[in-house]
Amino acid sequence: MFTRILKASLVTLLAASLAVGLAQRVEIEFWHGLNPPGGTLLEDFAAEFNASQDLYTINASFKGGYVDTMNASIAAWRAGNAPHIVQMFEVGTAVFVYSGAVKPVYELFEQTGVPFDPEVYLGAVRGYYSLPDGRMMSMPFNSSTAVMFVNNDALARAGLDPATTPLETWEQVRAAAQQVVNTGAAPCGFSFAWPTWTQFEQFSAIHDLPYATRANGFEGLDAELLINSPLHVRHVQTLMDMQAEGSFTYAGRGTAGDAVFPSGDCAIIHGSSGLRGRVVNEADFDWSILPLPYYADAIDAPINSVIGGASFWVMTAPGRTDAEYRGVAEFFNFLGQVEIVERWHVETGFLPIVFGVYEKLLAEGYYEANPGTDVGYLQLARTAPTENSMGFRLGNMPEIRTIIEEEIEMAWAGQQSAQQALDNAVERGNVVLRAFERANR
Amino acid sequence: MRRRTIYRHKLLPYLLLAPQLAITLIFFYWPSAQAVYQSLLIQDAFGLRTQFVWFENFQVIFSTPRYLESVRITVLFSTSVTLLAMGPALLLAVMADQVIRGATGYRTLLVWPYAIAPAVAAVLWLFIFHPSIGQIGQGLRALGIPWDYRINGNQALFLVIFVSAWKQVSYNFLFFLAGLQSIPKTIVEAAAIDGASQARRFWQVVFPLLSPTTFFLLVVNIIYSFFDTFGVIHALTEGGPGRATTTLMYRVFRDGYVNLDLGSSSAQSVILMTAVILLTVIQFRYIERRVHY
């Protein structure tokens, strides 16, 4: 009995390998940096693509976080065996745009003749990953934006009716956070995750403030930072004042600020729209999601926010064939389908970045049943992006983010004023930009 | 008559040494040489555009006040970690040496932390010292101490020193204990018969006899605090707040791995390597003279 099973399985195995050998499927390496559940779903998409046709096989593999994936792909490219596709966080865009190690997406589709329409992507998404003339450099995939999470129970405990308390401007948010802390409704009134992304990048975009010269760097490597403008300084000062009065508690860099909301510690936070899933799972209180606040005397109505997240880059390597590039293009088209984008949005909380998905789900009543899931999208899509809200094309942006965080942390600690912190950040950030310009000229 | 060699073939000793030499050459000398070469270049991340700039990277590093700030932090960090890791270890070893019942149990428990990965150790202490979810953190705040290592640089530095030292105590303990057990009991007993008090027996008999172990551990701990504490810092503070816990090693990581500035990162590695070599040479030349083998 046992030998028979063994024999049968051997025959099957042989047949299977023969079939693979006969069909000559083109193997395509795809490195990504997403943890489960997002990463798992992404790998499912790759498997579904493989099953949907018999010419290409996408081998999706997780290479650690974004920074690890980036370094792995750079090292592999230097060694001449880069993966065909690599997922790269949005702030690494400039590094790849200027690298000369990638095949731009517009070129990929032109060369392979696979039809592709970049116009199906939202302006704020497409713009981030395109050259100023509109040629798309990388394939948008997982995009989020920053939104405001509000603990309605904490507000109610503080004597504020969540349904009627306006939280549209910074003055209103500050007053609410102050009341929450004063009444002891929560130990922390206001905080945020991703300090530079939520308080500088998003802040500049919605206030239509330039972040750097040369259209935030889109028009050239010689851009210089502009984040020490009066409104930026005023904002850091506001946060310092809020810290002094007890209504703002700094939670740390990166995702460190995520935890303080679902735990109930902080009544109001700014975080990624992708945080919603965790809040659904962990928060045992009533909450809601609102757009980011603005300074009412600085802009009448805030404009669109910018994205975060990652996109897919096509890397070159010696001996790469047209068939391989064609497979990449087909896979990209597969991922851009409305059904795939819809599943990605609904299951992971990332934004519906293709036109039509939001409208479809709205008609089906999805947003009514899942309140708050549409806030990020509406904020991102509320206006056409301007030069200041298209995104950023600054070299070594992760380093600039760290510099800003270092300098504002020293302001929170009372070691320097808001103006000094931002002047220092601009000065040091410009050194980084000049170094990048020199290394990539 | 002295026999110079026991091998017939002249080749055999080299052959036997070859694997070790190959490993040293491939995994130490070659990367080191690469780092030295890279430190003289300005290059984009993908290595497509390379400029040879001689010592410009070094010049930039030494003219950056933040680098000198990192040097200061590293000196403070390394000295504290080394002292804090060796002092308690010696105390524990002396006490464990006197334990007769259940000695293995104590020893096992004391050695345990060494088996924990740096990042795990960091997260463990984060859960204890975190100002809002950590028990000691909450306790300190309840006592009215404004404990928040996410904003207060001194507290952050204390925390990474504490966790780094805690991880290394086990290792030191093990060596101190072995050192103590190799000291002949007769010598200590002779001193006792001569009327030396316990403290005197320790400082004038045991401690000098322990000096080879102490010296070895001093070198190892300084190297540990320079190079192996990255995981703890990365998991706890990421070099912040501000730059309060950015040691030289952490700077090398951030400039090279995150910021993709390979030239500056290599130059910093070369400086760090030189510093540790110099430090070790000084230790062997000046401190080893006081060591009694």
Image: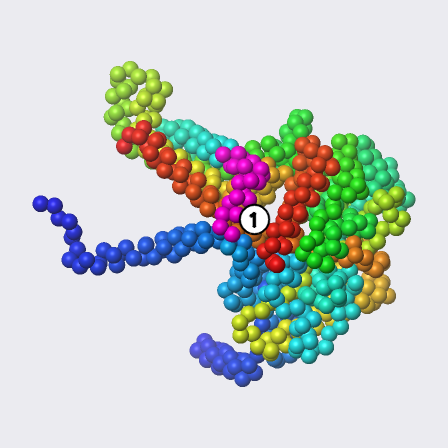
Give the percent coordinates (x, y) of residue A356: 81, 68
Task: Name which quarter of the figure residue B107 lies in.
Answer: top left
Query: Of B7 and A236, which appears nearest the observer?
Result: A236
Label 1: state its secondary structure.
helix
Can you tell which quarter of the image residue A337 is in? bottom right
Q: What is the crowding at mark 1: few (fewer than 14 residues within 10 Å), some, or many (at least 20)?
A: some
Picture coordinates of residue A105 (x, y %)? 67, 69
Q: Residue at x 27, y 22 (%)?
A: B189
**Mark 1 belongs to which amino acid?**
Asp
Q: Is residue A156 above or below residue A278?
A: above
Looking at the rendering, the stretch of residues picked out in magenta corresponds to B53-75
Left or right: where does residue B195 sit relative to residue B266?
Answer: left
Tell me if residue B66 is in the magenta stretch.
yes
Identified at 47% across, 79% down, the residue is: A10
The foreground one among A86 and B254 is: B254
Residue at which label 1 appears: B255
Please give the name of the residue rendered at 71% of the width and 40% of the height, measured from the top-left corner. A423
Q: Main secondary structure of the magenta part?
A: helix
